[in-house]
Amino acid sequence: MYGYSGRILHIDLTTRKTWVETKPEAWYKIYIGGVSMAARLLWENIKPGCDPLSPDNPICIANGIFAGTPVPVGGKYGLASKSPLTGFMGDSLSGSWFSVALKRTGWDGIVIHGASAEWVDIFIDDGRVMFRDARKLLGKGTFETEETIREELLDDQVRSATIGPAGENLVRFANVTNDGRQAGRTGHGAVWGSKKLKAVSVRGTRGVVVADPDTLMKMSFDITQQAQGPYTVKYRMLGTATNVLNMNKLGLLPTRNYQQGTFEMAEQVSGEYLEEHFKVKKIACAQCPIACEQVSAAKPGLYAGAMTGIEYECLYANGPNLGIGDLNAVIKLIDVADRGGQDAMSQGVTISWAMESFERGVLTKEDFKSKKYPDGFEPNFGNGEAAVALAEMIRDREGIGDLLAEGTRIASRRVDADRGTESYKWAMHIKGLENPGYDARGLKTFSVGLATGTRGGCHNRSAAYDPDIQGEVDRFSIDETRGRLAAENEEYAAVYDSLPLCKFIRRCFTGKADRAGAWPAIAALINATTGWNFDYDAVDLIGVRAHTIKKAFNIREGWSRADDHLPYRWHHEPMKEGASAGHVVTEEELEYLKDLYYEAKGWTKEGLIPKAKLIELGMEDVAEEIGV
Amino acid sequence: MVTSTSRYAYIACDATKCVGCQLCEYICSYTKTGEYNTYRSRIRTVRVDEILITAVACRTCEDAPCVIACTRDALKQDPETGLISVNAERCDGCAWCIEACDFGAISINPATKMAEICDQCQDQEDGPQCVLWCPKDALELTTPDQRAQKARRKLVHEEVHGPR
């Protein structure tokens, strides 16, 4: 078998035993890699209904098919566990050297079971597995942990995926970091922390061999050249932060906890302003010729020393969404998140919930006491210092940070239950996962993509804002095409997430990003790597299957139609100003859109998957368990 | 930056352009061994910290210390090109050359236990493959003299027109 070793490594932290599972080639053809394979491993290895922070929730790591080869942007791996934020499928992707080093160890995937009694980190040295005492790493930030491990093991090419203090403290939106990149969403860091697992390090010294190297080299060279041209200019120049002004113009830039869609200081937090005043260097993931990571540093002053990569999603959440117009503070907030090891998006949206709760009197100055501020502080929107204090308190679970570390959904429910308030009305999450930087009131197709998303409020799994923003449809109204558009869009994204390839390469194959433009080239790359005979339809099925296994997981965990919801605010509060003013997504609209979407997927009206559909996809055992 | 004082050409990396993608390592190992394995690359990317990233290959020093250090006379320097060749018959992988190299540009192949050194792809028609592939044009085959000329031109340009 080319492209795979056929072997999955199982590690039990409770017993410290390891074993090897072999998988047939047919299995890989269905669950090809990344998110798809990670989700499938989770399906196979979890005890359904378990507490996400219990030993029964395994960590599933699945590598990419192209990792370790010159195929551009193929250096990515998928990570899956049951999410402590949503209680449903928690799947994330991360790029860079970890996946490449993992490839060379010869393991296609790793499943980590159980929980350790003492803090531990795992070192996978080609075929060997070592359990190391991780107590001396406790409290260290993500980047520092990686560096320390590399120094201890005396090898530059050792790559580690780690958690920071946030993961140690079981912050529900803590994440896993490797090489400065994050498997960012759905709270993997808390799962690792619950197992007392500080890091997984890999050293792979074995070469990667592909079926048809001549074709692979030629195609990779051409794509690498294309990636220096106009198709990636957005990512190479300003990075995704360029979206700030675009979203502001469309009235979709979440501002002050989604109370507004435009930000009066948008210029000062724009990608253009960042480029001019704060940019230090552009860097790349391993195997990536684009280099979109915009490393930026705060200026001398209050936030001096803060430096990290800035992307649109983290920027909107910790900038406009908090009413903050000072990029120094925004960089500091994202720096705290990245080094502390927590999801900068969920961090921003949770803090914005706290700020609005404070401004509405649900929380008071008394609630915001800390060691640094013994008399409490006033976290109004725009107060950068207060926001930084809250981010650090969440990371350390200090004071009210202990509540906010539970995420927006649990925090709002707990406060409402204790105080008889209605702060759920401005808790901006879907299924417990905090929302991305697009206000769905002005994006009707996206609204159903978001509501039905298997991992909650996420722009990566469904990019159904595309037809809305590109003007393919009227973004303020609904019609019978929207269910199909949302379904097609998420299945398209799932192909990239399962290879995985970074979506930023999507136009570099032929200039066109649609299926017709990309699938033939992707099929050729898969065939050159594995020696298989994938065609357009087979590539298309990758996405359908990946999405189906995630949905099936949610159904087995008790999902019902009511779980596909939007935040209260988007249903009941029309957008106040800007280009999307006056719009909401009514509950009737959403229910109609859900009907259309389930129908387009070939599911029942209740959103369940027919047995026949699953069997058609080659997922007989799944049909047996959850098919109707 | 530490540079060789050699008159010979070598593969230089502009650290301001290098993004750390590691493609040079894949391409090098594939060209030389037919497999993708950064442990078998003769050029190495170095990530010193989050933003300080570069790549290093043999600097073709004059009176190369690695050649002098070799106790078995396995290394030889071509007087024309400055390239270091390894005699497979003689090399026993003792790694003295690695210790002698100020640039960390020599490695031992884990499979053959022999020293491997950049030969600027003498066997390839279109020259060093890493230079050909580098997506950011950070790599070039150059000499210290050419680099000095470039630096002078850049300096004058900046003094007259201001930085970039």
Image (cartoon, rainbow, N blue to C red):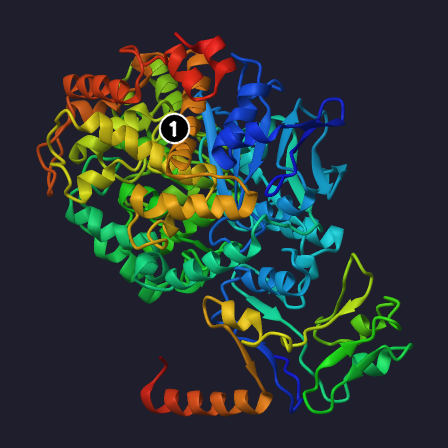
At mark 1, the secondary structure is helix
The chain ID associated with circle 1 is A
Write down the residue under mark 1: A544
**Crowd band around label 1 with a 10 angstrom C-alpha radius: few (<14), some (14–19), many (20+):** many
Q: Locate residue A70, reporting x and y percent.
A: 53, 56
Q: Which residue is drawn at 21% across and 20% down?
A: A596
- Quarter location, residue A359: top left
Q: In this view, does A229 lie above or below A396?
A: below
Q: Locate residue A421, reporting x and y percent.
A: 28, 17
Asked if residue A102 can be seen in this view, the reply is yes
Q: Locate residue A84, reporting x and y percent.
A: 48, 24
Q: In this view, does B8 lie above or below A153?
A: below
Q: In this view, does A123 lie above or below B12?
A: above
Q: Which of A44 and B151 is in front in this view?
A: A44
Q: Is residue A118 above or below residue A465?
A: above
Image position of A527 (left or right of A565): right
Q: Which residue is drawn at 18% across and 23% down?
A: A571
- Quarter location, residue A201: top right
Q: Quadrant of the N terminus of chain A?
A: top right
Q: Which residue is drawn at 59% across and 88% down?
A: B144
- Quarter location, residue A572: top left
Q: Extreme front residue here? A: A533
Image position of A39 (left or right of B144): left
Q: Nearer the viewer, residue A23 or A462?
A: A23
Q: Nearer the viewer, residue A153 or A383?
A: A153
Name the residue type under label 1. Answer: Val
Q: Extreme top residue here? A: A628
